[in-house]
Amino acid sequence: MEKSLILVKPDGVERGLTGTILSRLEELGLKLVAIRMLHADKELAERHYAVHRDKPFFNDLVNYITSSPIVAAVFEGEDVVNRIRKACGATDPAKSEKGTIRGDFGLDIGRNTIHASDSPETAAIEVDTFFAGGDICQYTRMR
Ligand code: IDP
Ligand code: MG
């Protein structure tokens, strides 16, 4: 079954939005299969954002995601990657629609509250960055 890795970023955790964000995803009928809180170090952050290594905002990105604890979670379900990306809204909160997580809670393009995998292939790599195989739980999601 398709998986997606999400991170509640420092601005989400610090403002007490973790539960709200996880609820929004659970309310889509998606199945939470792994979750942990952590304070990412530079090495982990650079690995997670490796695809952005050459971007001008790379250092800001790594500094921000390592500045305070985050919550990493894995959701599972049909078309889960696309469904979560839609629920997140556009990268820049100024451009994301109301009713989306970033549209409702994002502060600016850096502090945009949530990370979500952008393809099933990326998700598989990102899940492995934050979780061990045995961390992924199996159960039946009731509606
Ligand atoms: P995404 O999170 O919507 O997938 P990406 O393009 O993968 O967006 O960028 C990763 C993160 O880097 C974004 O969530 C955002 O916080 C940050 N970011 C993206 N573009 C910019 C930019 O132009 N300036 C500063 N930060 C940016
Ligand atoms: Mg991305």
Image: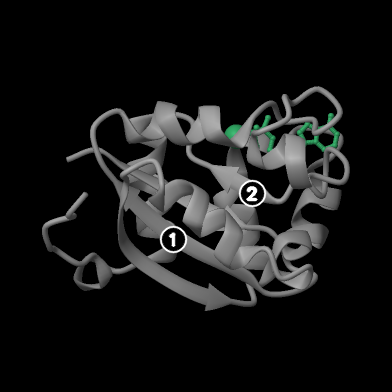
**Total numbered labels placed on residues in the image:** 2
- Read off the residue under disc 2: 114
> Where does residue 101 sit, x and y in percent of width and height?
65, 42
Quadrant occupied by the N terminus: top left
- Read off the residue under disc 1: 73
Please, is residue 92 above or below residue 4 in the view? above
> Where does residue 74 sit, x and y in percent of width and height?
37, 56
Please, is residue 110 above or below residue 64 in the view? above
Picture quarter with ligand 2: top right
124 and 34: which is toward the camera: 34
Q: Look at the image and tell me whether residue 53 can be seen.
A: no
Q: Residue at horizontal 87%, vertical 46%?
A: 107
Tag 2 and tag 1, C-beta contact below 8 Å: no
Please, is residue 20 above or below residue 126 in the view? below
Numbered label attached to residue 9: none
Q: Is mark 2 within 8 Å of ligand 1?
A: no
> Where does residue 66 sit, x and y in percent of width and height?
73, 67
> If you read the primary sequence from the N terminus, does the residue marked by circle 2 or circle 1 appear first?
1
14 and 129: which is toward the camera: 14
> Where does residue 114 sit, x and y in percent of width and height?
64, 49
Residue that extends furthest to the front in the rendered view of this protein: 143
Q: Is residue 68 left or right of residue 132?
A: right
* Amino acid found under the numbered disc labelled 1: Ala
Q: Residue at horizontal 56%, vertical 66%?
A: 19
Q: Look at the image and tell me whether residue 139 can be seen.
A: yes
